[in-house]
Amino acid sequence: MRRAAMWMILLCGCGDGTSMAPGADAATGSTRAVIRGEVRYDGSQDGSLLVGVFEWDEAHPSQPMGPPADFVPVTEPTFPMEWEIAGLRPGAYFAGAVLDVGRDNPTIPGEEDLERYSERIDVEAGDVVVVDLELRDE
């Protein structure tokens, strides 16, 4: 349920995949970090894709507990799908990908949807970190 709430917040008013993280200013790119990677999926399900980067919460590791720092929506993904989120302040994050199977409700992932979340990602100013996520039929 918490993941469902996170994606609902994500689609109802957060970033558009091209903006800097909340609170970002006009600082140069070298003072910010980038997390990018690839989402891989070789299954048979069809749907839209959401990739988000979230601040790490020690009390709830790899669980979205609030809005993402930013996200990338892809209506018609082809895999492998490259993604990038730039403008992140130094800190601890994790990445997540959700394939909304059937494209019926992207704001609330259901049991039919495929989800994958990374481990903790620590970034410093100027870092470019690669995080690949693999979705699997289960």
Image (spheres, helix red, strand yellow):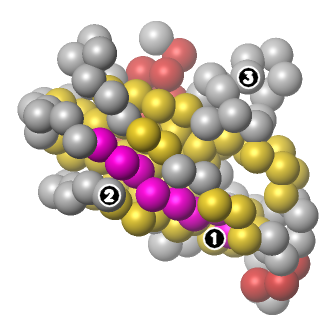
User: Within the magenta stretch, is there residue 36?
Assistant: yes
Residue under the point 19% across and 35% down: 43
Residue under the point 45% across and 63% down: 83
Quarter of the image where one finds residue 60 = top right
Mark 2 residue type: Pro
Q: Are marks 1 and 3 in contact (CB under 8 Å)?
A: no
Q: Earlier in the sequence, mark 1 or mark 3?
A: 3
- Rendered image: mark on residue 102: none
Mark 1 residue type: Ala
- Rendered image: mark on residue 80: 2
Q: Are marks 1 and 2 in contact (CB under 8 Å)?
A: no
- In the structure shown, which secondary structural element does the residue marked by tag 3 occupy? loop
Segment tinted magenta in the rendering? 34-41
Q: Earlier in the sequence, mark 3 or mark 2?
A: 3
Q: What is the CA distance from the residue labelled 3 to the residue labelled 2?
A: 26 Å
Q: Which residue is mark 1?
A: 86
Can residue 15 be seen here? no
User: Within the magenta stretch, is there residue 119?
Assistant: no
Residue under the point 14% across and 33% down: 45
Q: Main secondary structure of the magenta part?
A: strand
Residue 62 placed where, x, y %?
Answer: 66, 27
Residue 117 placed where, x, y %?
Answer: 55, 32
Residue 92 placed where, x, y %?
Answer: 82, 45
- Rendered image: mark on residue 61: 3
Quarter of the image where one finds residue 41 = top left
Q: Earlier in the sequence, mark 1 or mark 2?
A: 2
Q: Is residue 42 above or below residue 57?
A: below
- Callout 2: few (<14), some (14-19), or many (20+) C-alpha neighbours within 10 Å? some
- In the structure shown, which secondary structural element does the residue marked by tag 2 occupy? loop
| Numbered disc total | 3
Name the quarter where the C terminus is drawn: top left
Q: What is the CA distance from the residue labelled 1 to the residue labelled 2?
A: 20 Å
